Image (tube, rainbow, N blue to C red):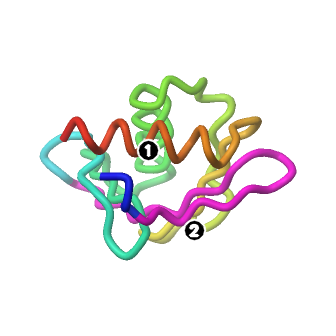
Amino acid sequence: MNDIHLEIKKIEKGSLLVLKAHPGAAKNSISGVHDGKLKVQITAAPDKGKANSAIIKLLSAKLKIPKKDIEIVKGETSRQKTVLFHGVSADDLRDSLIALLSEM
């Protein structure tokens, strides 16, 4: 499972993760990785930021990172999003995601 490739970049503020959102799903879940992007399914529709809020809530719950430390910095109206995890190292984020994905 450690050979999973995730697009995670270390920056001064923390770590950036690229993900692919699938709104209107049957349930909120992290469903795997495709082309280096974390696949996130959410029940909320992409309407007035509801899907983005649901993504942040899901990532916060699954990764045990406070919602205030998770910010969508690119792709707010796109399915492909770049998420900033404030104060989280790239290694810690990668380890947490690999552990979470290995439970699937």
Q: Amino acid at mark 1?
A: Ile
Is 4 on the left or on the right of 15, as rendered? left
Say which quarter of the image contains residue 16: bottom right
Q: Which of the two residues, 81 or 89, is positioned nearer the viewer here?
A: 89
Give the structural element (helix, strand or loop) at label 1.
helix
Disc 2, SS: loop
Residue under the image location 83 percent in, 46 percent down = 13
- Image vertical order of residue 24 relative to residue 92, above or below: below
In this rendering, the answer to whether 8 lies above or below 102 is below
| Residue picked out by circle 1 | 55
**How far across and down, in percent of the image, does residue 81 sit?**
53, 64
Q: How many residues crowd around disc 2 within 10 Å: few (fewer than 14), some, or many (20 or more)?
A: some
- Are the residues at dot 1 and dot 2 in contact (C-beta closer than 8 Å)? no
Quadrant location of residue 103?
top left
The residue that mark 2 highlights is 75
Q: Which mark is residue 91?
A: none
Quarter holding the C terminus is top left
How far apart are the two marked residues, 1 and 2, measured between alpha carbons?
13 Å
Who's the residue at 76% across and 45% down the image? 14
What residue do we see at 43% from left, 65% from top? 5
Query: Which segment is the magenta one?
Result: 5-24
Whether residue 59 is in magenta: the answer is no
Q: Earlier in the sequence, mark 1 or mark 2?
A: 1
| Residue 72: % across, % down | 62, 53
The image shows residue 17 at horizontal and vertical percentages of 57, 57
Q: Main secondary structure of the magenta part?
A: strand
Q: Residue at x 18, y 52 (%)?
A: 25
User: Considering depth in this image, is 7 or 60 the residue closer to the camera?
Assistant: 7
Mark 2 belongs to which amino acid?
Answer: Gly
Judge left or right: residue 9 versus residue 62.
Answer: right
Give 36 or 76, whichever is nearer the viewer: 36
Does the magenta run of residues contain 23?
yes
